[in-house]
C-alpha cells in the first residue's frame, strides 16, 4: 500500500487548500532535487507519499536500487566515490575525515545526517505531528542503551542515535509549542548555527575569529543605538544566557563603585545592597550569591497588581538601607517579567537612581525585542538612562539558543573589571588593533560564537522584518486575551490587556465553578493546571507553562514568541485546555 505523504497527514484538520498544498509541495520537491546523493528523492517521497508523487521524481527505494548498480572505478578502501551505496554498519568514526580517502564516507555520512535533520524540520512545522512524544525518565533510560562504551559504535549506530534523540526531543519550533519564552525555529538562524559549528572557533581574539569579532562589534553598537545611547556608544559582550548577563551587570556595578574589590575582595568594602522587583528573575539573587554579596543583600521591592515595581517603595527601602549604614549600589529594573510580562516604570526608577547615585540595570532579556517595534517600544521608555541592559535575542526575536547580550553605557568598564592580561592570548605586540581582542572582557576564556546567527537573521529580515514578527506575536496575545476574558470556565489572573505576550489565566472546570467555600475552591483550583499539563504532554498536542505567583495558586502562563503561530493555533489551545480539563 502506498504511504501517505507529509501534505496528506492531518488533511481533515486543514481547510480545503489542496491546490496550495500541491504547489507548495512541488516547490519543495523542485528545491530538494538539487541535493545530491538521493536526499532530494527522499524528501519528495516524504512530502508526497509513494502514491502521490509527481511524474519524474524518484523515491528512496528506486534511488537505492540505481545507486547499488553503479560501478565503482576506484581501488581505495574505504571507497571514496559518491555514487555507491555505503554500508555504515561496517564503518566507524575513524573512517571519516581526516582519514585517508575519507571524503566519500564523510560526504555520505553527513548526507544521511542531513536527511534526518531535514525530515525533523519539516515535521516540526506540521501541526498533525506531536509537539512531544513524552516518556518518563526511567522509561527512556531503560528503553534504550545510552551508556558510553569502551569500543566504538558503528556509524549506523551513530545515525540511529541521532534519529532516536530527535524522536523524543520536544519540537520547540512547532506552532503549538508555547511552553517557554524561547520558541520557534528560524531557517536562517539554523543555517548560521550550522556554519558557526563548522567554523568551530573561539571568540577571545581577533586573530582566530576575525569576521565574528567584527560582526559582534557592529551588532552590539547597533543594539546600543536602539537603546538610545548616542551613536551607539558604550560596550558590551555576548554571554551564555540572560542570567550570566545579569551577573556581569552586578559585577561591573560593584567594580565601578569599589574597584579595589577586584584584588582585595569583599572584606575590603562596606556591606552592599541591591534592589529588584519581587517579580524579577531569580538570577538577580543568584548573582548576589555567586559574587559574595549574598542573597540577603538583595532587597525585593513591592509591585502593583500588574507586576510593576512601585517606585515609592523602592525609594523607601533605599533610605532604610542607608540608615543602617549599608551601601545601596545597584537597582535591577525589569522590562518584561518572566511570568506577568510586566514593564517596570523605568523613568521613575532612573530618577531615583540618579538621586542616590545608584547603578541602574535593566533586565530586558524578555522585553528587549520590543525596541525593534515602533508600536511597542514606548514600553521601555527610560531604558536609555540605564547604566547597563540585558537583551536576549533568543527570546522575542527568535534567534536560536543561545544569544544574550550585556550592553554597558560606559566604554572600557568591562575590560578593566575583568581583564587578567594572560600573555599567551593577549600579547601586546600583535600587528593589529588590540581593542578587537575581546576575550579579556569576559569571565570565561572559551566563548562560543553566538553573534553570527543574530547578525545573519538581521541581514535576512531587516529591522522591519523583526518588527513585523514581534508585532504579530503581541497581536496574537491580545487575540487570546479577548477570546478568553469573558469565556465560561476561564478567569484572568489580573484585569487588562497583556503588556507583553504573557497571558495569565485559570481554567476552572465545571466541578469547581460553583463551589462557595473559598479555601476548598482554592485547593481544588491549585491542582487543575498541573493535571491538564500532564494530559497535554501525554497526548503531545501542545505545551504551555503554569506556575503559582505570590498568593495566587497555579495558573497557566501563555507566552507567544513563535512566528509560526497563528490565530488557529490559539483557538486550538483554548479548545484543547477545555477538552483536557472538562472532567476534572
Image (cartoon, rainbow, N blue to C red):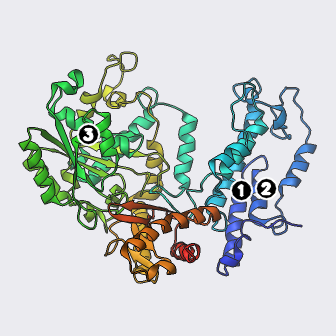
Q: Is residue 111 in sight in this rendering?
A: no
Give the residue number, with chain letter if any, for mark 1: 32
Q: Is residue 256 in sight in this rendering?
A: yes
| Mark pair 2, 1: CA separation | 7 Å
Give residue 369's position: percent from left, percent from top: 36, 57
Q: Is residue 365 left or right of residue 146?
A: left
Give residue 59's position: percent from left, percent from top: 83, 57
> Residue 568 occupies which quadrant of the picture?
bottom right
> Residue 413 occupies which quadrant of the picture?
top left
Q: Earlier in the sequence, mark 3 or mark 1?
A: 1
Mark 2 and mark 1 in contact? Answer it, CB < 8 Å. Answer: yes
Q: Is residue 139 left or right of residue 374?
A: right
Q: Earlier in the sequence, mark 2 or mark 1?
A: 1
Nearest the eye: 325 or 389: 325
| Mark pair 3, 1: CA separation | 50 Å
Assess disc 2: are there few (<14), some (14-19) or many (≥20) residues with their C-alpha within 10 Å of its C-alpha.
Answer: many
Q: Tell me the residue at 46%/36% (across/down).
A: 448
Q: Nearest to the eye among marks 3 and 1: give it.
A: 3
Give the residue number, with chain letter if any, for mark 3: 250
Q: Is residue 97 left or right of residue 545?
A: right
| Mark pair 3, 2: CA separation | 54 Å
Disc 3 element:
helix
Give residue 496's position: percent from left, percent from top: 31, 75
Give the residue number, with chain letter if any, for mark 2: 41
Q: Earlier in the sequence, mark 3 or mark 2?
A: 2
Above or below for 198 versus 360: above
Q: Is residue 274 left or right of residue 368?
A: left
Q: Tell me the residue at 22%/40% (across/down).
A: 297
Quarter of the image for the N terminus: give it: bottom right
Amino acid at each position: 500500500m502506498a504511504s501517505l505523504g507529509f501534505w496528506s497527514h492531518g488533511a481533515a484538520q486543514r481547510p480545503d487548500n489542496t491546490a496550495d498544498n500541491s504547489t507548495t509541495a512541488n516547490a519543495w520537491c523542485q528545491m530538494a532535487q538539487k541535493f545530491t546523493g538521493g536526499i532530494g528523492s527522499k524528501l519528495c517521497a516524504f512530502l508526497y507519499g509513494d502514491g502521490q508523487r509527481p511524474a519524474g521524481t524518484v523515491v528512496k527505494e528506486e534511488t537505492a536500487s540505481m545507486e547499488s548498480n553503479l560501478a565503482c572505478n576506484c581501488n581505495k578502501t574505504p571507497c571514496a566515490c559518491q555514487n555507491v551505496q555505503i554500508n555504515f554498519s561496517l564503518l566507524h568514526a575513524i573512517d571519516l575525515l581526516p582519514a585517508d580517502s575519507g571524503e566519500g564516507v564523510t560526504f555520505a555520512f553527513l548526507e544521511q545526517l542531513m536527511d534526518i535533520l531535514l525530515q525533523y524540520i519539516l515535521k516540526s512545522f506540521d501541526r498533525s505531528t506531536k509537539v512531544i512524544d513524552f516518556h518518563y525518565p526511567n522509561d527512556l533510560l531503560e528503553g534504550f542503551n545510552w551508556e558510553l562504551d569502551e569500543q566504538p559504535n558503528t556509524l549506523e549506530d551513530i545515525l540511529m542515535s541521532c534519529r532516536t534523540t530527535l524522536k523524543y526531543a520536544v519540537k520547540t519550533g512547532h506552532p503549538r509549542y508555547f511552553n517557554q519564552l524561547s520558541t520557534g525555529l528560524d531557517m536562517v538562524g539554523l543555517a548560521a548555527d550550522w556554519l558557526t559549528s563548522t567554523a568551530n572557533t573561539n571568540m577571545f581574539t581577533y586573530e582566530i575569529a576575525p569576521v565574528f569579532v567584527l560582526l559582534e562589534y557592529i551588532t552590539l553598537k547597533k543594539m546600543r543605538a536602539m537603546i538610545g545611547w548616542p551613536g551607539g556608544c558604550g560596550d558590551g559582550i555576548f554571554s551564555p544566557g540572560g542570567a550570566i548577563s545579569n551577573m556581569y551587570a552586578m559585577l561591573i556595578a560593584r567594580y565601578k563603585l569599589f574597584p579595589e574589590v577586584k584584588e582585595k575582595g569583599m572584606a575590603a568594602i562596606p556591606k552592599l545592597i541591591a534592589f529588584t522587583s519581587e517579580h524579577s528573575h531569580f538570577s538577580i539573587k543568584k548573582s548576589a550569591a555567586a559574587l559574595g554579596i549574598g542573597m540577603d543583600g538583595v532587597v525585593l521591592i513591592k509591585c502593583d497588581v500588574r507586576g510593576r515595581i512601585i517606585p515609592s517603595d523602592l525609594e523607601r527601602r533605599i533610605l532604610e538601607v542607608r540608615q543602617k549604614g549599608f551601601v545601596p549600589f545597584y537597582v535591577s529594573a525589569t522590562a518584561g517579567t518572566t511570568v506577568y510580562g510586566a514593564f517596570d516604570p523605568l523613568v521613575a526608577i532612573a530618577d531615583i537612581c540618579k538621586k542616590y547615585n545608584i547603578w541602574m540595570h535593566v533586565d530586558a532579556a524578555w522585553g528587549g525585542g520590543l525596541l525593534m517595534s515602533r508600536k511597542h517600544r514606548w514600553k521601555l521608555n527610560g531604558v536609555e538612562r540605564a547604566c547597563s541592559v540585558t537583551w536576549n535575542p533568543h527570546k522575542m526575536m527568535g534567534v536560536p539558543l543561545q544569544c544574550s547580550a550585556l550592553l554597558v553605557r560606559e566604554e572600557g568598564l568591562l575590560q578593566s573589571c575583568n581583564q587578567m592580561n594572560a600573555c599567551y592570548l593577549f600579547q601586546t605586540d600583535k600587528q593589529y588593533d588590540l581593542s578587537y581582542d575581546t576575550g579579556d572582557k569576559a569571565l570565561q576564556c572559551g566563548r562560543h560564537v553566538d553573534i553570527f546567527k543574530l547578525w545573519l537573521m538581521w541581514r535576512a529580515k531587516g529591522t522591519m522584518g523583526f518588527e513585523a514578527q514581534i508585532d504579530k506575536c503581541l497581536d496574537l496575545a491580545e487575540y487570546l486575551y479577548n477570546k478568553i476574558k469573558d469565556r465560561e470556565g476561564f478567569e484572568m489572573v489580573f484585569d487588562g490587556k497583556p503588556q507583553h505576550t504573557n497571558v495569565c489565566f485559570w481554567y476552572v472546570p465545571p466541578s469547581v465553578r460553583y463551589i462557595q467555600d473559598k479555601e476548598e475552591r482554592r485547593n481544588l483550583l491549585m491542582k487543575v493546571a498541573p493535571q491538564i499539563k500532564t494530559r497535554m504532554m501525554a497526548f503531545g498536542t501542545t505545551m504551555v507553562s503554569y506556575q503559582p505567583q505570590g498568593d495566587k495558586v497555579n495558573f497557566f502562563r501563555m507566552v507567544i514568541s513563535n512566528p509560526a503561530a497563528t490565530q488557529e493555533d490559539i483557538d486550538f489551545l483554548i479548545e484543547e485546555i477545555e477538552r483536557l480539563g472538562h472532567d476534572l
